[in-house]
């Protein structure tokens, strides 16, 4: 299938693979997305993060054309999805959360069917079926009926189907939900290869280490609003929390410490300090007699997980007080 040359603006600047401007969507009385501005560059992997119900699937469904935005504008490679939906989505690959595989067909038949839907014919369709099966570990399963595959294997078929026509923009909605460790590692390798060849990837997940393994940029949705966007190091630097975590025998004793603290589950006390690896001696000294009750001490360095929890907790607080 012919593809457009790499799109550029009149001034020579690259046009993003995906651009959302002020996008909003409501379901009845529920605001699923509000005022979302977002760009994904060619060859970029964007990890889309957010708690359950944050709006990730809604965002992907809008980009894919399964839903229509109430407000705003979505462009794929510079083409407006509202005014020219067919051209805009010609180079789009989508693997939604809900599995879309035909159970009575074999893996090969499923892949061939979707290859043909994407405009591939004959030898090209056959070749792509084999090519895409390989990194997903489906080669040995090609003649098996999908109904006779495990849940994780079915998800692999489902994700492979989205990639048959070498799309320029891929939307993967929790592609590793329920798959095993090996498949996850393979998928991550394949997504990185795809991005290396210029494909932009929107990848939603609840497994934050995957975002790190993908070396993805991050977008955080919270209650339908985009609350953070940046590279991993940027987010971790500006929002990652560092602490010395203390566990005491019989729960946290009364303490007066010169640092901010938070109480975690199971009697764990988090003492928020910068450079926690250097602060442990000071923290131990400040415990006084209570140090004898200490059963565990852990240095917590800033991480994506702490940045994510910090960001979404802050929004929760703002929501409560706002
Ligand atoms: P998850 O991580 O659980 O998959 P998500 O971030 O993908 O969540 P969405 O599925 O986009 O979240 O949902 C966003 C909000 O819209 C939620 O409050 C959800 O309850 C609501 N919602 C989603 N689909 C519908 C629908 N068809 N009708 C009514 N409300 C909906």
Image: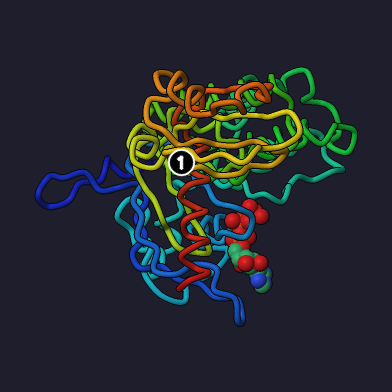
Frontmost residue, 89 versus 174: 174
Q: Is residue 1 visible?
A: no
Residue picked out by circle 1: 307
Q: Is residue 268 visible?
A: yes
Q: Quadrant of the N terminus?
A: top left
- The structure's colour scheme is rainbow
Rendered position, 65 above or below 89? below
Badge 1 crowding class, 10 Å Cα cut-off, few under 14, some 14 to 19, many 20 or more, is many
**Residue at the spot 60% in from the left edge and 37% down from the top edge:** 269
| The quadrant where residue 172 appears | top right
Q: Residue furthest bottom?
A: 29
Give the side of residue 71 with respect to residue 234, left or right: right
**Residue at the spot 48% in from the left edge and 28% down from the top edge:** 286
Rendered position, 71 above or below 51? below
Picture coordinates of residue 153 (x, y %)? 77, 31
Q: Residue furthest left?
A: 11
Picture coordinates of residue 62 (x, y %)? 51, 62
Q: Secondary structure at mark 1?
A: helix
Q: Which image quarter has ligand 1?
A: bottom right
Rendered position, 273 above or below 25? above
Give the side of residue 78 with respect to residue 114, left or right: left
């Amino acid at each position: 299938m012919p593809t457009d040359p790499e799109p550029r603006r009149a001034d020579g600047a690259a046009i993003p693979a995906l651009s959302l401007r002020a996008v909003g969507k409501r379901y009845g009385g529920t605001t699923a997305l509000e005022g979302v501005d977002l760009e994904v560059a060619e060859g970029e992997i964007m990890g889309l993060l957010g708690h359950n119900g944050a709006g990730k699937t809604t965002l992907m469904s809008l980009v894919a054309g399964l839903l229509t935005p109430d407000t705003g504008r979505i462009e794929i490679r510079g083409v407006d999805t509202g005014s020219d939906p067919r051209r805009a989505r010609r180079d789009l690959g989508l693997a939604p959360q809900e599995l879309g595989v035909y159970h009575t067909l074999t893996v090969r038949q499923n892949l061939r069917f979707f290859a043909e839907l994407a405009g591939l014919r004959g030898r090209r369709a056959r070749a792509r079926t084999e090519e895409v099966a390989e990194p997903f570990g489906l080669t040995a399963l090609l003649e098996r009926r999908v109904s006779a595959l495990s849940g994780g294997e079915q998800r692999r078929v489902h994700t492979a189907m989205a990639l048959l026509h070498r799309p320029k923009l891929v939307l993967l909605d929790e592609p590793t939900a329920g798959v095993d460790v090996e498949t996850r590692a393979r998928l991550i390798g394949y997504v990185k290869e795809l991005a290396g060849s210029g494909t932009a990837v929107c990848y939603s997940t609840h497994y934050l280490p995957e975002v790190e393994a993908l070396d993805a940029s991050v977008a955080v949705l919270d209650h339908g609003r985009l609350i953070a966007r940046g590279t991993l190091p940027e987010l971790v630097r500006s929002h990652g929390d560092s602490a010395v975590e203390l566990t005491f025998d019989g729960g946290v004793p009364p303490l007066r410490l010169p640092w901010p603290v938070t109480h975690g589950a199971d009697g764990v006390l988090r003492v928020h300090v910068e450079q926690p690896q250097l602060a442990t001696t000071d923290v131990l000294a400040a415990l006084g007699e209570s140090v004898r009750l200490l059963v565990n001490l852990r240095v917590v360095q800033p991480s994506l997980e702490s940045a994510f929890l910090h960001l979404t907790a802050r929004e929760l607080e703002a929501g409560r007080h706002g």
